[in-house]
Image: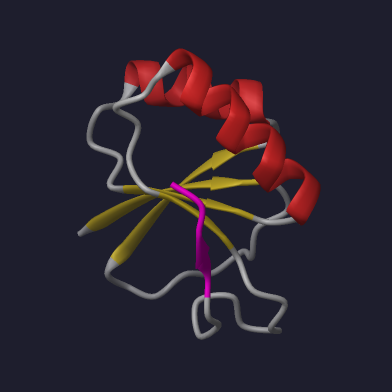
Amino acid sequence: MFHLLVVGPAPAQAPPSFELIRAATPEDAVELLARNRRIDAVLVFGAELARETAALLAEVDPQAPPLFEAGEEADPFGAVATRLS
């Protein structure tokens, strides 16, 4: 099982091998990461949210899991994501 922290307006469904943990804001993401070290990666929907999340995580948690910005596809899990950190 892959534990994915999703920031922003995320899809309702994910592939069966993914467990989605949802955060509405970058601040929520930092709080969830502080409480849950099982998170394998962070996927952010929206360029502005991605910039805010990357800056905040770099400031408060340099050991945070890899951070990705979702592509613009209808199926974000089939799309190419851009790695931000």
84 inside magenta stretch: yes
Q: Which residue is drawn at 72% across and 77% down?
A: 72
Q: In this view, does 8 lie to the left or right of 85?
A: right
Query: Is 24 left or right of 32, judged from the image as shown?
Result: right
What is the x, y in percent for residue 14? 47, 70
Residue 31 location in percent, x, y? Answer: 50, 17
**Most prominent secondary structure in the magenta stretch?**
loop
Residue 12 quadrant: bottom right
Residue 2, above or below 31 = below
> In the image, which residues are magenta?
81-85
Up the image or down, 30 lies above or below 71; here it is above
- Foreground pick, 66 / 78: 66
Colour mapping: secondary structure
Query: Is the N terminus in the top left, top right, bottom left or bottom right quadrant?
Result: bottom left
Residue 61 on image: x %, y %: 39, 20
Give me the residue at 66% from left, 46% from top. 50
Query: Furthest-right residue in view?
Result: 48
22 with respect to 24 (left or right): left
Count of all numbered marks drawn on residues in the image: 0
Q: Where is residue 57 shown, x and y percent of the image? A: 50, 26
What residue appears at the point 70 percent right and 33 percent down from the top-left corner? Answer: 52
Above or below residue 57? Residue 50 is below
Considering depth in this image, is 30 or 84 the residue closer to the camera? Answer: 84
Quarter-of-image position of residue 22: top right
* Viewer-nearest residue: 48 or 30: 48
